[in-house]
Image (cartoon, rainbow, N blue to C red):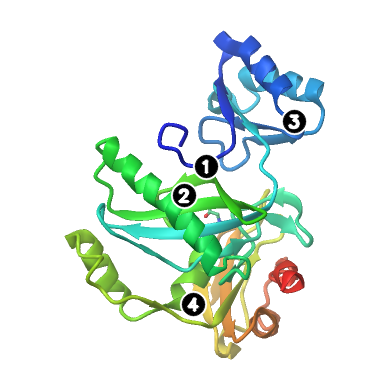
Amino acid sequence: MEKHGVPTAKCLKVSKENLDEGYKFLESVKAPYVLKADGLAAGKGVLILNELQEAKDELSKMLDGKFGAASATVVIEEFLKGIEVSVFVLTDGEHYVLLPEAKDYKRIGDGDTGLNTGGMGAVSPVPFCTPDFLNRVEERIVKPTLKGLKAEGIDYKGFIFLGLMNDGGTPYVIEYNVRMGDPETEAVMTRIEGDFADLLFACADGRLNEVHYAKSDKTAVTVMMVSGGYPEAYEKGKVMTGLDTLKDVVAFHAGTAFDAENEVVTSGGRVIAVTTHGDSIEEARTKAYREVEKIHFEGANYRHDIGLDLMRMQ
Ligand code: GLY
């Protein structure tokens, strides 16, 4: 990102060899301090610390294997403040389309409390993603990113998931993923009008500039139902009832299976994502919770506040 002029947090990669440089970098940025394991850590390798000494101590512990081999190298980042949003791009390497954006709710508990999860719900569109904001995303992030890929000799066709921070109307990149997001996809896909396969064929053929693509004006709200205990240990095999009573929803089965009696049972932590639509967040979330309450299984858990923060912002 630095090389290709994409706005992001200031950062430094630290290993045992340049630990002193890491300490100096921590002294040069303001609290809170963000330490990220550079390797894959199942979404758990990030620490956000308020005290400088604590940050230095944790940096040293991470390099000593706090997250195993994943933290043999640690990225120290300047803390970005603001609200996160996920923006999705489909590119054929030359052209791109901006798919609908979504806000994800990552913590397990209401009011953004508790452990990080794969995502407990999503809302699309996101009210602060005004045409002006999205224009800034395209000019400052999407275009330099695609130009950067080309400059690096990477012929990339597919999705780019931009994890962004909106700091007072200015977008910064927190992360890129080369996939869609979960549970953002469960909201976003339902707002793409027309034949999605056409978009994918056009992407593969380098014709994304030729296809017609439109987004629905409806608001989609997705609520993820999870097993009790998730994101830590949870039990499987709980019989699910109420699925045949759902109305006007798209219910995405994630961690479900049939048992020997052909009943639907839970078979994972993230069990089912329920998406509904409305003319406003309020309407869509009222419907979503009405339907979620019809689904029963032992230990079922979900967040009750998906979309509330965005409604308060409107
Ligand atoms: N919901 C975040 C992700 O898919 O990475």
Q: In this figure, which residue is indicated by the disc labeled 1?
A: 7
Q: Quadrant of the C terminus?
A: bottom right
Q: Which is more foreground, mark 3 or mark 2? A: 2
Which residue type does callout 1 highlight? Pro
Residue 108 x, y percent position in the rendering: 71, 56
Instruction: In the rendered view, tell whether residue 165 sits above or below residue 247.
Output: above
Q: Nearer the viewer, residue 160 or 243?
A: 160
> How far is disc 3 from disc 2 in space, using C-alphas?
25 Å
Residue at 75% of width from left, 25% of height from top?
55
Q: At numbered mark 3, what does the secondary structure look like: helix, strand or loop?
A: loop
Q: In this figure, which residue is indicated by the disc labeled 3?
A: 30
Q: Are marks 4 and 2 in contact (CB under 8 Å)?
A: no
Which residue type does callout 4 highlight? Asn
Q: At numbered mark 2, what does the secondary structure look like: helix, strand or loop?
A: helix
Which residue type does callout 2 highlight? Arg
Which badge, 1 or 2, is on the more N-terminal residue?
1
The reply to whether residue 182 is visible in this rendering is no
Q: Nearer the viewer, residue 63 or 90?
A: 90
Q: Which is more foreground, mark 4 or mark 3? A: 3
Q: Are marks 4 and 3 in contact (CB under 8 Å)?
A: no
Q: Are marks 1 and 3 in contact (CB under 8 Å)?
A: no
The reply to whether residue 284 is visible in this rendering is yes
Q: In this figure, which residue is indicated by the disc labeled 2?
A: 140
Which residue type does callout 3 highlight? Lys
Q: Quadrant of residue 245?
A: bottom right
Instruction: In the rendered view, tell whether residue 92 sits above or below residue 7.
Output: below
> How far is disc 1 from disc 3 in space, using C-alphas?
18 Å
Residue 210 x, y percent position in the rendering: 22, 71
Q: In this figure, which residue is indicated by the disc labeled 4?
A: 262
Q: Are marks 1 and 2 in contact (CB under 8 Å)?
A: yes
Q: Quadrant of residue 213?
A: bottom left
